[in-house]
Image (spheres, helix red, strand yellow):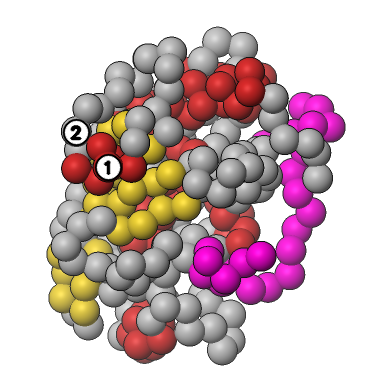
């Protein structure tokens, strides 16, 4: 794996992330986002950071205003998530960590109380996937808009998997829900190596395929075998 980013490179990456997240926040999709400089501020919504601030946020409060399940056939909104890109200590080689901080915990395979969201091993390509695509990916998981689970996978909630399979037919909760395509070059001049991951239609496995590499430092990590939904805290 390439060496970690220098402090200057990480700052550039964070500024790019922040501007792309800001573009998502101002779009018409049902996601509202604020950036913050501490976990406490993100969890309470205090002291938001402007998206054009040169001292970028390190925590994000993401409000998914569309419906998800909180029980069999029981819908609820919104879902509020705290996203911490730097939590693993080696961003963007490693993915962000995210937790549900709203009162009602989504009833899905990937969400549970008091634990990091199980975002899936293949949701993040080292140095290539953008934070905005990660936030959109979590939204897709809330909407059950993902490839069918591998046989034997139970995630955090085997009952939710069975309900998705037997009652929902492995289809999204809201098939009409879609998200915009946010590209770094559209929000940051000469963004170059931080181009956004490719986006296709909902419920397709290739939605988070990386953009074509522009240099050896930012080539995608090799593809991994099945096991895409291992909870974040269980990975070494």
- Which of the two residues, 32 or 96, is positioned nearer the viewer here? 96
Quadrant location of residue 6?
Answer: top right
Residue 115 in the image, given as x and y percentages of width and height: 39, 67
Tell whether position 224 is magenta: yes
Left or right of 17 in this view: 173 = left
**Helix, strand or loop for disc 2:** loop
Circles 1, 2 touching at the beta carbon (< 8 Å): yes
Q: Which residues are magenta?
A: 210-236
* Residue at the (59%, 44%) spot, across then down: 89
- Residue drawn at the location 56% of the way across and 22% of the way down: 11
- Left or right for 199, reference 116: right
From this viewpoint, which residue is outermost toward the right? Answer: 216
The alpha-carbon separation of the residues under discs 1 and 2 comes to 8 Å
- Disc assigned to residue 23: none
Q: Quadrant of the C terminus?
A: bottom right
Does any portion of residue 138 appear in the rendered image?
A: yes
In this rendering, position of residue 161 left or right of residue 148: left
Q: Quadrant of the N terminus?
A: top right
Q: Position of residue 149 (x, y in %)?
A: 53, 77
Q: Earlier in the sequence, mark 1 or mark 2?
A: 1
**Residue 65 highlighted magenta (yes or no):** no
Q: Residues within 10 Å of mark 2 (few under 14, many from 20)?
A: some
Magenta span: helix, strand or loop, mainly? Answer: loop
Tell me the residue at 61%/62% (across/down): 121
Q: Can residue 66 be seen from the camera position used here? A: no
Q: Which residue is disc 2 drawn over?
A: 46
167 in relation to 33, above or below: below
- Residue 151: x %, y % from top left: 58, 86
Q: Which residue is mark 1?
A: 40
- Position of residue 65 relative to residue 48, above or below, is below
Residue appearing at x 53%, y 64% in the figure: 232
Label 1's element?
helix
């Amino acid at each position: 794996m390439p060496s970690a980013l220098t402090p200057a490179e990480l700052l550039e990456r964070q500024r790019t992330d922040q501007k792309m997240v800001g573009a998502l926040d101002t779009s018409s999709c049902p996601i509202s986002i604020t950036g913050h400089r501490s976990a406490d501020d993100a969890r309470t919504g205090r002291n938001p950071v402007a998206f054009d601030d040169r001292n970028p946020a390190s925590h994000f409060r993401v409000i998914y205003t569309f419906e998800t399940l909180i029980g069999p056939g029981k819908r609820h909104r919104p879902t509020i998530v705290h996203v911490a890109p730097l939590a693993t200590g080696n961003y963007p080689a490693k993915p962000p960590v995210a937790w549900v901080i709203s009162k009602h915990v989504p009833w899905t395979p990937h969400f549970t109380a008091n634990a990091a969201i199980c975002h899936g091993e293949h949701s993040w390509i080292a140095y290539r996937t953008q934070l905005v695509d990660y936030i959109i990916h979590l939204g897709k998981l809330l909407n059950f808009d993902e490839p069918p689970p591998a046989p034997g996978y139970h995630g955090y909630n085997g009952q939710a998997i069975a309900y998705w399979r037997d009652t929902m037919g492995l289809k999204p909760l809201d098939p009409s829900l879609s998200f915009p395509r946010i590209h770094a070059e559209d929000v940051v001049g000469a963004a170059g190596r931080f181009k956004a991951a490719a986006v296709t239609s909902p419920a397709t496995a290739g939605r988070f395929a990386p953009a074509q590499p522009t240099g050896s430092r930012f080539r995608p990590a090799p593809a991994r075998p099945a096991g895409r939904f291992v909870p974040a805290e269980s990975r070494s």
